[in-house]
Image (cartoon, helix red, strand yellow):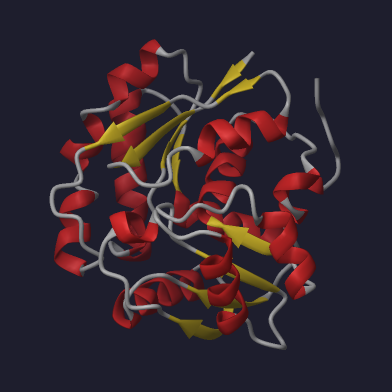
Amino acid sequence: MTALGFLYPGHSAEDDYPRIEMLIDSDVRLPVVHTDIGEDAHRVDALLEMGAPERLAAGVEELRLSGAEAVVWACTSGSFVFGWEGAHDQVRSLARAAGLPASSTSFAFAHAIGEVGARRVAVAATYPEDVAGHFATFLKAAGAEVLSVRGSGIITAAEVGTWGWDEVLAMARAGDHPDADAVLLPDTALHTAAYVRDLEQELGKPVLTANQVTVWEALRLVDRRVNAPALGALFTKEPVVQV
């Protein structure tokens, strides 16, 4: 049994994690611990506070007790808003606090882009335009070519968590770029686990979504690969090792 720990800010789309665990259908558990988010706002100052080291450290003991072998800060905006170097500092601080390998959703996207063989990407974000721009800057620092960035102007994670298939598909279509190798949907507050394969069929290319890449990143940290086609191209790369 492999247990992978996630620090998730507040409550919005955390039910993606048990759904992903079911879709993986292997000896993998995905325990989630909720962190205190402070103000629910996709605004730079609020996001910096949300991702503060003491807020993340508060949840690591519960994850250790769950048997987690690695921990991922399951928040994209609360990691990329620190910038490339600051996000590294955030992860190093989390790893020290947890005594475990650690990462964040922002780095998960950076690594997943390479995994699906994408060089040029399009960003379809729920965030306001300025926050979405910070994500694009992070991706560029990771070596990706960002062809387009589309924000949706939503301030709260609570509102994002109410979106269903129709809204997610409309955003993905609007944010796609004809020359992009992959489309990125960066908000962990957005329910996407049930939609990834259908999104890829609609757009004709890999789609990387926040909770999907976060789980993949945790598996990467413990050197596990699983084959789960329902979770899209990211989960069908060789070599496949699955029990």
Q: Residue 146: tell me if it is visible.
A: no
Residue 38 horizontal side relative to residue 21, left or right = left
> Which residue is depicted at the point 52% across and 48% down?
211
Please determine whether, in this image, residue 204 is positioned above or below residue 88: below
Q: Quadrant of the C terminus?
A: top right
In which quarter of the view is residue 129 placed?
Answer: bottom left
Please determine whether, in this image, residue 103 is positioned above or below residue 234: above
Residue 107 horizontal side relative to residue 79, left or right = right
Residue 67 horizontal side relative to residue 47, left or right = right
Q: Quadrant of the N terminus?
A: top right
Residue 213 % position (x, y): 58, 50
Residue 141 % position (x, y): 47, 72
> Which residue is depicted at the point 48% across and 62% down?
186
Q: Residue 47: tell me if it is visible.
A: yes
Count of numbered circles in the view: 0
Residue 217 % position (x, y): 57, 43
> Which residue is depicted at the point 57% across and 57% down?
209
Please determine whether, in this image, residue 224 is positioned above or below residue 183: above
Residue 205 % position (x, y): 76, 70
Foreground pick, 13 / 133: 13
Foreground pick, 139 / 5: 5
In which quarter of the view is residue 183 placed?
Answer: bottom right
Name the outermost residue toward the right. 239
Foreground pick, 105 / 165: 165
Please determine whether, in this image, residue 65 is positioned above or below residue 110: above
